[in-house]
Amino acid sequence: MLSSRGGPVYLLMLAAGLFLAGLLPKSSLGNLHPDRSADLVFAGSSTYAPFQWLDAQGQARGFVIDLQDSMAQLGGVKAEHRLTAWESALSAVESGEADAVALFASERRSQQYDFTNPFYYQFHSIFSHTDGERFSSLVALSGQTVAVTAAAYAQEKLEEEHPDVRLLPVESERACILAVHTREADACLEATLSATRHAADFDVRRTSSPFWPRAYVFAVRKGNSDLLEWLNFQLAAMQSDGTYFAIYQKWLPELEWRKPTIADHLTTLAWIIAPILLLALLGLIGAWVLKRQVARRTSQLTTELRSRRRLEKQLRDQAEYDAATGLPNRPAFIGDLERRLSEAPDWSPTLVFLRLLSLDSVTSTFGRTGHEELIKDFGLHLEHLGFPLVSHLGTGTFALITPQGLTPEDIMARLTTSFYIEGLYVDPGVVMGISIGRADDTGKDSAPTHAEELLRRAVTAYASAHAKGNAWCVYTPQLQPDPRDLILLHDFRQHGTRDMRLVYQPKLDLASGRIREAEALIRWEHPRLGFISPVHFIPLLEKAGMITRLTRWVIDEAIEELARYRTRDPDFGISVNIAAQDLADGAGLVEFLRDKRPASSLQGLRLEITETGVIQDHDHTQRVIAALREIGIDCAVDDFGTGYASLSYLSRFAIEEVKLDRSFIRKMRENRRDYAIVASTIELAHTLGLKVTAEGIEDQATLEALAELGCDTAQGYVISHPTAADEVYRMIESIT
Ligand code: C2E
Ligand code: MG
Ligand code: MG
C-alpha cells in the first residue's frame, strides 16, 4: 500500500519519460489562428490542486495544466483551460464546448468517452472529522452519509459497488471536505492528493490508506478519434522528449504534498536549536579543545570526501542506467545509437519501440509491486535475448535495436512470453512500432539528432499500431497525423458554415434538351487552409458526429434557392446530398423537414443518398425513405454501381431515381463492359419505374451515346461545372 505522501516511486517512474525526444514534427498551425483565442479547449475542475485549479488571480494552474500547455505547444495549437465545477466540466465535453478533460478512466465513462493512454495514476481515500469516528474502510461506510464530488469517479464507483452508502454529491472537492467539517456528511471519499490539501484547512483528516489505484487519462467525446489520436501523439511526444519528466519534476513537491505533522515541526525546531547549542558548547569548551577539533574536522573531511566520491559514482551510474530494470536509460541509448550511426555510415538499423499494454491492468490489480515486477522481469527477458542495444525508457516502454534480417513476426515471437506475477501468469501485451533503415537519406524531419529521429519514427509507428489495435506497425511517412483535420473540426465547431457556400451543377433533361434540375454541392473556402474538398471534410464531419448541422444548413440554403428557381420554372428541382449519418437519424431529418413553413417550400426538393448509405440498415432506411416520400420528398440513389446493391434490391425502397456513378460513364465508349453495364442499368431501371441520371459526362460523344440509350438526365462538365446559382440561371435562359 502506498504511503500517505502520495509520491510512490512508481509514479516517479511514470514520469520518467515514456518515449524519446523530438517525437513529432512541430507544426506551425498555431499561427494559423491569430484571430482566435484557442484551437483546443480543455475542461477541468477549478478546485483540484495540485492537478488543476484556479489561483487567487483566476489563473489556471497545476500539473495537468502544464501538461496541456506543453501538448498544445508541441502540436502547434493554442490551448484554453476552462476550469469550472466538475460536473459542468464533464457537460462541457459532452456538449462539445470543450474538447478534452483529464479524468479517471472507468468502465462507465468509457461508454461516453474515448480515453488516451494513461499519464498518471491516482488513489482515493476516506476522510473523516477529527473529532468523530475514524472511517478506515469502505465496509465501515455502510449506512453512513458520504460526501462525493458530483459526477466524480467516487460517486460512480460507490453507486455501483456500495449501494448501501448514502451519497451526498456536492459541487467540488473542497465542498466535499467542508461537508465533513460541518458534519453534514459522516465522511467524504475523494482522490487522495487533492482532498488531503483541502482537509488541512478544516477539522478533517484522512482516515484510510489510499485504495482504488486508477489510471488518469484525457477523455474526449466518443468517436472523436482524430483528437484522440492527436492527444496520444502529443503525450507520446512530450514523454519522449523529456517534457513530461520536467513537468513532473517541477510539480513533484506538490504531488508529494502533505500536511506538516508535529514531527515535522519538531524537526524544524531541532534545526534551529542545534547550531545554537553547538555554539554554546564550543564557547564552553574553549581553546584547549581546538587541537582536537582540528583533528576531528580533518577526519570528517576525509569521510565526507569519500562519501562524495561514492555519491558521484552513484550519480554517474544513475545518469546512464534506469533504476527499475538496470538497463541503459534513454540518454545512454540515444548517445550509444548516435555514436554507432556516425561510426558506421553503411549501417542500416532496425529500431523497435514497444510498450507493455498489460501494465495498466497489472497496476490496477496488483498495485505498485506488480507494476514494478512486470517491468523488471520484461527488462531481464530483453537482456537475455542479446539484442545489440536495449533500453528502458520508462513506465513499461522499451527501445531496442534488433539484429539484421529479423522480420516483425520474428521480433514479436522473441518478445512474446508470459511472466509469473503475484501468483498469476501475465501476458505483457507487447505493441511495437518499428523504424527500418537510416534517416539521413530522407532528412531528419524534426528531431535534433539522427538517433532521436529514428526513435521518433518508431514511436509514430507505435501510435498507429496502437490506434488500430494491431500488434505492430512499420514506420512510413504517411503515418504522420494531419493536424489540419483538427483545425477543420475545431473551426466547424466554432464557426459552422461561415466560410461555406453552395454551388449548383445543372442537370440536362435529355428528352427536352432543357435544364430542369440542379444538384447543390458544398464548397469550403477556408480562410487559411484554402479550398477543402467535400470528399475530405464530409467524412471528417461524419466521423466527429457533426454532419447533421451541415446538412440542415445545406437544406435551408437549397430551399431558399429553389424558391427563386421556381418563380421561373414552377417544376424546377434541386437535389441535396445527405450523409449516411443523416439517414441513421432519419426521424430527426424528417421532423426537421416537416417543420418547414410553408410546407409547399419543399416541393422540388430531392435528397441524394449514396448506395452504401441505403443498404446499411435495410429496415430503418426503408422507413425513413417512406416517411420522406409522405412529406413529398423524392430520394435518389447516388453513385450507383460503386457498392454491391442490385437495382432490383434498390427498387424495394421508395426511390425515384438512380444516378449512375461517373466511373462507368468515363470509359463507356472505349470499354465494352462499362457500356453494357450502363445500357442494361438504364433498361432495367426503366422497367422498374426508376429515372436514370448519368453523372460525370465530360464529352459530347458520351452525352450523345447516353441520349441514344434512353438515359433521362445528364450531369457533367460537358454541360457545366458546378457553379454559382446566378450562372445556372443564365444557362437556363440561354438554352430556352
Ligand atoms: P456526388 O454527389 O456524386 O457529386 C458529384 C461530384 O462529381 C461533385 O464533386 C462534382 O463536382 C463532380 N463532377 C460533376 N461532373 C463531373 C465531371 O464531368 N467530371 C468529374 N471528374 N467530376 C464531376 P464534389 O463537388 O467534389 O463533391 C464530391 C462529393 O462530396 C459528392 O459526390 C457528394 O458525395 C459529397 N458532397 C458534396 N456536397 C455535399 C453536401 O452538401 N452534403 C453531403 N453530405 N455531401 C456532399
Ligand atoms: Mg450527389
Ligand atoms: Mg455521385
Image (tube, helix red, strand yellow):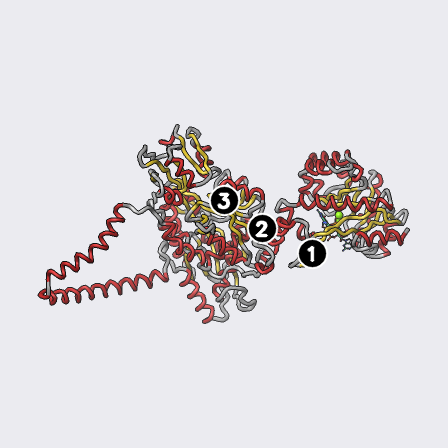
Q: Which numbered tag is attached to residue 668?
A: none
Closer to us: 373 or 493? 493
Residue found at x 30% / y 47% = 260
Whether the residue carrying mark 1 lies under 8 Å from ligand 1 is answered with no
What x and y, as percent, mark residue 681? 81, 44
What x and y, as percent, mark residue 324? 36, 54
In this rendering, which labeled residue sits more in front, label 3 or label 2? Answer: 3
Residue found at x 33% / y 44% = 4
Instruction: Name the amino acid, label 1.
Output: Glu
Which of the marked residues, 1 or 3, is nearer the chain's N terminus? 3
Closer to us: 393 or 114? 114
What x and y, as percent, mark residue 363? 41, 45
Question: For numbered disc 2, what is the local secondary structure?
Answer: helix
Q: Quadrant of the N terminus?
A: top left
**Residue placed under numbered mark 2 in the picture:** 226
Q: Is residue 155 above or below residue 122?
A: above
Q: Is residue 157 above or below residue 677?
A: above
Count of numbered badges drawn on the protein:
3
**Residue placed under numbered mark 1 in the picture:** 525
Q: Which numbered tag is attached to residue 84?
A: 3
316 relative to 593 in the view: left or right: left
Whether the residue carrying mark 2 lies under 8 Å from ligand 1 is answered with no
